[in-house]
């Protein structure tokens, strides 16, 4: 629903957030943000918000799962998918430290290269597997996008947020005060985000091929082949809509870590047992 928020309403919400930070709002009003980045305060471009992941990502998923892919089509859809993922990761990163444009370009080329290489390589191996029946080969070919996308997603997150490992991210006490920059917290944030990016495509790229292999045998679809693409799209949309909240809910955006696990200089700067950091989405 946040995709349809007007500029006027967004301005009002930003004002409410500012008032809340100064203690002018009654209890019960939260400062959770879905459109405005919590650190930069800038509006996230609609296709790159988490609320836009499903509507803007579903056409790409359908393209990735199309049967009888050629090398050119495989490269195109993997490139488009990782381009979208790179922008989503950048827009929803921990922005307490600036990310250079060079880093964005590195993750872009790294993720695309890994995804395309793995997908094309697996396709070539399957085509040369003469012992497999045509039906089995088609099912396996439809499942190939998952390992390709999962590995590229890890690469995407790791490269996109690599500077956090060297510079650290801000950790906050219970009152929201910055205690310092922690490389250990950054490592936890990146690992948690990377794990969600492996879980996210699992239902999306595994369930639709299995479901469609059965649906295609139905007399209705045998007689009306034009219905295959819209039904395939609906199946992808349903699995995407279920898998995104599942993956995002694995770890809270504002994660916590025990002070005893952090750098000594941070542990000495506070009496808190637990501190908070923005994991990113």
Image (cartoon, rainbow, N blue to C red):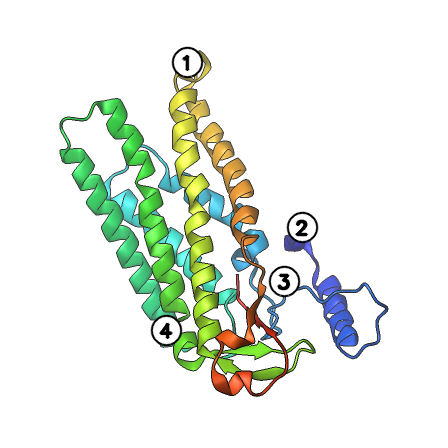
Label 3 to label 4: alpha-carbon separation? 24 Å
Q: In this view, does 156 lie to the left or right of 252?
A: left
Q: In the rendered structure, find residue 103 and report the number of the disc placed on it.
A: 4
Callout 1 crowding tier (Cα within 10 Å): few <14, some 14–19, many ≥20: few
Reading the image, the residue beneath label 3 is: 35
Q: Dot 2 corresponds to which residue?
A: 1
Of tags 1 and 3, which is closer to the observer? 3
Frontmost of labels 4 and 1 is 4
- Residue 254's spot in the image, x, y percent? 60, 66
Element class at badge 3? loop
Q: Which of marks 3 and 2 is nearer the N terminus?
A: 2
Determine the CA span between mark 3 and mark 2: 11 Å
Q: Position of residue 85 (x, y in %)?
A: 43, 57
Is 228 rendered above or below residue 176? above
Q: Earlier in the sequence, mark 3 or mark 4?
A: 3
Q: Residues within 10 Å of mark 2 (few under 14, many from 20)?
A: few
* Tag 4–tag 1 contact (CB < 8 Å): no
Query: Alpha carbon of mark 1 to alpha carbon of mark 3: how far?
Result: 45 Å
The image position of residue 68, as x and y in percent, is: 28, 33
What label does residue 255 carry, if any?
A: none
Vertical placement of residue 60 versus 14, above or below: above
Q: Could you say where residue 75 lies in the image, as x and y percent from the top left?
A: 28, 49
The reply, left or right, for residue 240 in relation to residue 114 is right
Q: Distance between the residues labelled 4 and 2?
A: 32 Å
The tag earlier along the polypeptide, 2 or 1, is 2
Secondary structure state at the residue bearing disc 2: loop
Q: Mark 1 points at which residue?
A: 223
Residue at horizontal 54%, vertical 36%? 238
Q: Within the image, what quadrant is residue 113 found in?
A: bottom left
Q: Dot 4 lies on which element?
A: helix
């Amino acid at each position: 629903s946040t995709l349809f928020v007007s500029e006027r309403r967004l301005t009002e919400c930003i004002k409410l957030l500012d008032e809340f930070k100064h203690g002018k709002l009654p209890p019960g009003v939260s400062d959770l943000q879905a459109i405005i980045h919590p650190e930069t305060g800038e509006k996230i471009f609609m296709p790159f918000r988490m609320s836009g992941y499903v509507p803007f990502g579903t056409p790409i998923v359908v393209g990735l799962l199309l049967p009888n892919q050629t090398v050119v089509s495989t490269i195109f859809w993997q490139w488009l998918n990782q381009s979208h993922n790179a922008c989503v990761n950048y827009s929803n990163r921990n922005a307490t430290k600036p990310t250079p444009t060079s880093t964005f370009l590195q993750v872009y080329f790294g993720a695309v290269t890994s995804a395309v290489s793995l997908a094309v390589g697996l396709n070539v191996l399957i085509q040369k597997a003469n012992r497999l029946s045509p039906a089995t080969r088609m099912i396996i070919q439809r499942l190939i996008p998952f390992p390709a996308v999962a590995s590229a997603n890890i690469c995407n997150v790791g490269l996109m947020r690599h500077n956090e490992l060297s510079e650290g991210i801000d950790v906050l006490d219970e009152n929201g005060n910055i205690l310092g920059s922690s490389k250990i917290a950054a490592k936890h944030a990146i690992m948690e985000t990377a794990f969600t990016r492996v879980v996210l495509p699992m239902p999306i790229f595994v369930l639709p091929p299995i479901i469609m292999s059965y649906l295609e045998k139905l007399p209705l679809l045998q007689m009306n082949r034009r219905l295959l693409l819209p039904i395939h799209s609906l199946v992808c949309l349903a699995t995407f809509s279920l898998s995104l909240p599942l993956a995002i809910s694995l770890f809270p955006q504002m994660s916590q870590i025990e002070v005893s696990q952090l750098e000594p200089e941070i542990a000495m700067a506070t009496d808190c047992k637990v501190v908070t950091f923005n994991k990113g989405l």
